[in-house]
Image (cartoon, rainbow, N blue to C red):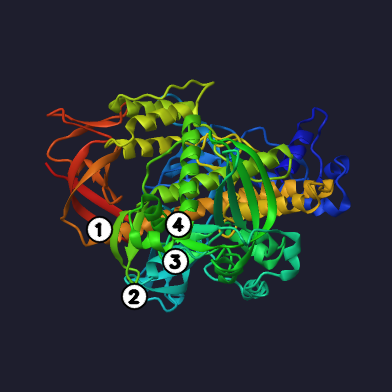
Amino acid sequence: MEDKQQKIIEFMKDDEYVPMKAKEIAMLMKVPKNEYNKFLETLGDLELKLKIQKNRKNKYSLIEKTYYDGIYRKNQKGFGFVRLNDGYNGDDEEVYISKENSLNALNGDRILIEILEDKNKVKSAEGKVVRILKHEKDTIVGIFQNNKNFGFVVPDDKNFGTDIFISKKDFGKARNNHKVLVKITKYPQNGKKPEGKVIEVLGNVNEAGVDMLSLIKEYNLPSTFPEQVIEEAKKCGNKVDKKDIPNRVDCRDRNIFTIDGADAKDLDDAVRVEKLPNGNYKLEVHIADVSYYVKPNSMLDKEALERGTSIYMLGRVISMLPRELSNGICSLNAGEDRFTLSCIMEINSKGNVVSSEVFKGIINVKERMTYEDVQKIIGKTDKKVLKRYEPYINDFKLMEELAIILKNKRMEQGYLNLDIPESKIDLDIDGKVINVGKYETTFANEIIEQFMLSANETIAEKFFWLEAPFIYRVHEEPDLEKVQELNKFLFNFGLKIKANKDNIYPKEFSKVLEEVKGKEEEKVVSNLILRTLKVARYEAENKGHFGIASKYYCHFTSPIRRYPDLFIHRIISEYLKDNYDVPEKWIESYKTQADDRAKQSSEREKIATKVEREAEDLKKAEYMEKRIGEEYEGIVSSITSFGMFVELENTIEGLIRFEDLGDEYFIYDEDRKRLIGERTNKVYKIGDKVKIKVKSASKLLRQIDFEILK
């Protein structure tokens, strides 16, 4: 679409061009008859974006003024910011939009703006919304409030920026304090609130499970599978097709293991390590051959693409594939024959992959291992577990040996070993929080991480040199300005990342992480570095992975729960089919697909990350609602112009506003990102240990406030 728009703009930029009608432009641009309607759509789109205009005689010409489009991020106070799609500013720069210039745009809307004031050293660029291209949401989740003759809904998304008016005839079955789903019937205009109609009652605000259901509806997540998709999944059966076994490498007699968390049900990777006579290691990574069951353009495939990824919402999983596949025939369950796409690597004592092969296999997993039990085996800490797995102890010792070699090699290259513990949130049977703490990981987790990294790198490099259509996992180097900002924080710890516009190396970040290893500030510094880095995404072009310090990287190891993995499995399978002799027509078709699928997968991943984070925030706030008045020790995790955030040992973070910092006025030192007491010169900086009291917590607002204790 962008290409076609650009061609039309280039055509109109020509000095010879005079305003003309659509048919004349199409004729001169040699648009085929069967593509004329699409051509008209493209003209309409350019008109909507204010790139071209049509006069009274229906003749088109270019608009000289430049407008930019992007996604609007609205603040509760009415103003907002927009990140632009088409080149006015840098990737991470945003344009400020005042409330008066917002044209009543709502959070998430796609908008068109003009620039009123360019960016300078003091402030960011300022813009004005000239057109709303697309409202992001036409349904909203919120709490219904009944005012007898009319009602209104207070949205869960506080940045939506306004309540929604509901007339009495549109109440449906909603009662006061019900969580509801509202269809917007009229968007805000001239200062008036938007209007809506209740289309679904989710339940009382405090009812079990309503909080997670609200998130599902808020993000319009597909919580159930269509009947045809389930039927297609059932047709795959629960046993492998014996007819296809002769076409595969039979690995069923080998000691192959899955190693996962105790509650995992979709097991898509299995491993084995062997020591070769030449002293090298043979690492086998066997991945579920999901592409064998999920065929291109099938109902299963279309549904998986739409979902893009599985979403894990604390005790509730919204899977990419139906349970019949994800927990059944595709899951590498112990003692069952399963089809795989396997990557075998020979690795030397320095951690270099000296040779590799990829093939279609069949395996039968010996044991379904947990991280906990593998750790007990390699640490020799539990006699009962050692006895239970006695025949395989050497297998796990070899895995540990190889994982150490691989990790050391990565650390030398500049692999960023960020120590940011995940939250472990325990729920009771009604979905209420009973505990929040750190998710403890061991070297057993590291074994699987190192093996999966190796397989992902090996596959990416192999198919890069084959010039195959592909989806890579791309993580570009951070912007120099962001690194300079980070150095202002690191100054407080006597640390610095050396960087200039030509050289930003992962090794420099890695050195800083090594320096804080085991120190109190390790977690804070890891978080600061994470905020400085760009967000990884999927692309059809290989651009390397900064965080892993790798030239070639992809996601190959989780096709049950990620669409890019499934898609590249399809490509790999095609190359294996006829000994890497692939028709040119097929390659061209998959190159186009790779681009589209990468964009869709990146978008779905963003939504999944947001939903998972909000589910955690909601449950953490619920947990702290019962702990108001309690005292804790925490670490200052960030400092802003409106207060400072403090993170507790259990991973819960709360805000201390300026008024809750004691009985003196604090000045915000933006350069050093610290707070200075006006009277006592008391300084608060990132990494400081502080004692706090829980002031307030709201599950509805997903917000926790602390106050400082002297």
* Residue that appears at 24% across and 50% down: 705
Query: Quick check: 229 left or right of 590?
Result: left
- Circle nearer the viewer, 3 or 4: 3
Q: Pointer 1: what residue? A: 624
Please name the amino acid that badge 4 sits on: Val
> Closer to the N terminus: mark 4 or mark 1?
4
Q: Is residue 146 above or below residue 72?
A: below
Across and down, in percent, residue 302 comes to 66, 62
Q: Disc 3 and disc 1: Cα gap in Å?
A: 22 Å
> Looking at the rendering, in which quadrant would you find the C terminus?
top left
> Closer to the N terminus: mark 3 or mark 1?
3
Q: Is residue 52 above or below residue 698?
A: above
Q: Pointer 2: what residue? A: 148
Which of the two residues, 255 or 434, is positioned nearer the viewer here? 255
Q: Pointer 3: what residue? A: 316
Q: Disc 4 and disc 2: Cα gap in Å?
A: 34 Å
